[in-house]
Image (cartoon, rainbow, N blue to C red):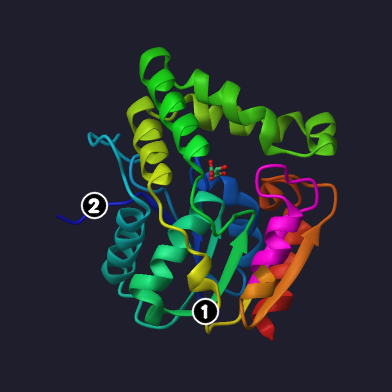
């Protein structure tokens, strides 16, 4: 059965699909929706279980399932022309699966603050532990685990609105959906072998102070993609598109007109 995804659609032109990170929703792309819709058709869904969607019932939602949902979404919107897939972090993990399964739909790719590798055994175990805690104690546990790692020192000091937006999104996300995505990420495959097979132009975008998916990991990822450009966004962390939308939008615009 097809999963209905709450989706914001704005503007006309070549489509850009904005795929949010964990445990967030489309609102992390507000700066891109506002800043790119003059020239592009911006499509910003909430992934299954997140944002304004119904909570999930399953124990796990895999990156393949999220990718298939997005393929169905494009079908339901009658998007026949090629799309730019832009995913942040977990959105990037979904992107790798989308390329593998529905790659013919893409004309370009933007990978923000993400990594190609699978979880280590320890990383997967930590995710399962966090999922258990979230199910027992609620989404506030995910706020405590994630929020301190999401933004740069500057954003933390100067943009309490951004920090509060992120806190609010995580707090209001259903615990079962958070746990299901954690279980899905824990079993995601290693996408490193896929990198050399990516044929579409790719922009790899990284917050210079990202500690979750740091610049050295992202630079190395870009080096393995045949037609990739690497851009580092100063004074931003893991949430670069939300922390400095002007810089990120400028990089995306430059990349898309090439
Ligand atoms: C995200 O921002 O989507 C998460 O940091 C991804 C992860 O936990 O690996």
Q: Report the disc number at residue 3.
A: 2
- Dot 2 or dot 1: first in sequence order is 2
Magenta-span inclusion, residue 218: yes
- Relative to residue 14, is residue 48 depicted above or below? above
* Residue 137: quadrant of the picture: top left
Q: Nearer the viewer, mark 2 or mark 1?
A: 1
The residue segment tinted magenta is: 203-221
- Considering every residue shown, the one lying at the far top of the view is 137
**Disc 1 on helix, strand or loop?**
loop
Percent across and percent down for residue 134 are: 42, 21
Asked whether residue 23 is in view, the answer is no
Q: Report the disc number at residue 253.
A: none
Dot 2 surroundings within 10 Å: few (below 14), some, or many (20 or more)?
some
Where the C terminus falls, by quadrant?
bottom right
Q: 105 or 35, which lies in front?
A: 105
Q: Residue at x 60, y 81 (%)?
A: 201
Instruction: List the residue tagged with mark 1.
Output: 198
């Amino acid at each position: 059965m097809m999963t209905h995804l709450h989706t914001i659609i704005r503007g006309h032109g070549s489509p850009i699909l904005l795929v949010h990170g964990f445990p967030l929703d489309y609102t992390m792309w507000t700066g891109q929706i506002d800043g790119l819709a003059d020239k592009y058709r911006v499509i910003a869904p909430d992934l299954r279980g997140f944002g304004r969607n119904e909570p999930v019932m399953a124990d796990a939602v895999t990156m393949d399932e999220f990718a298939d949902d997005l393929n169905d979404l494009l079908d339901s919107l009658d998007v026949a022309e090629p799309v730019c897939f832009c995913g942040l972090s977990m959105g990037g993990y979904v992107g790798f699966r989308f390329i593998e399964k529905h790659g013919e739909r893409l004309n370009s790719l933007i990978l923000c603050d993400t990594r190609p590798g699978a979880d280590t055994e320890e990383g997967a175990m930590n995710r399962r532990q966090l999922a258990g805690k979230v199910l027992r104690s609620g989404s506030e546990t995910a706020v405590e685990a994630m929020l301190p790692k999401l933004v740069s020192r500057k954003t933390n000091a100067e943009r309490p609105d951004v920090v509060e937006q992120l806190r609010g999104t995580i707090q209001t996300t259903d615990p079962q959906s958070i746990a299901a995505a954690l279980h899905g990420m824990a079993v995601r495959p290693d996408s490193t072998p896929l990198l050399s097979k990516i044929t579409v132009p790719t922009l790899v975008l990284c917050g210079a102070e990202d500690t979750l998916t740091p610049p050295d990991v992202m630079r190395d990822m870009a080096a393995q993609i045949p037609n990739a450009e690497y851009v580092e966004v100063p004074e931003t962390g893991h949430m670069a598109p939300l922390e400095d939308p002007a810089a990120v939008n400028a990089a995306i615009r430059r990349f898309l007109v090439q």
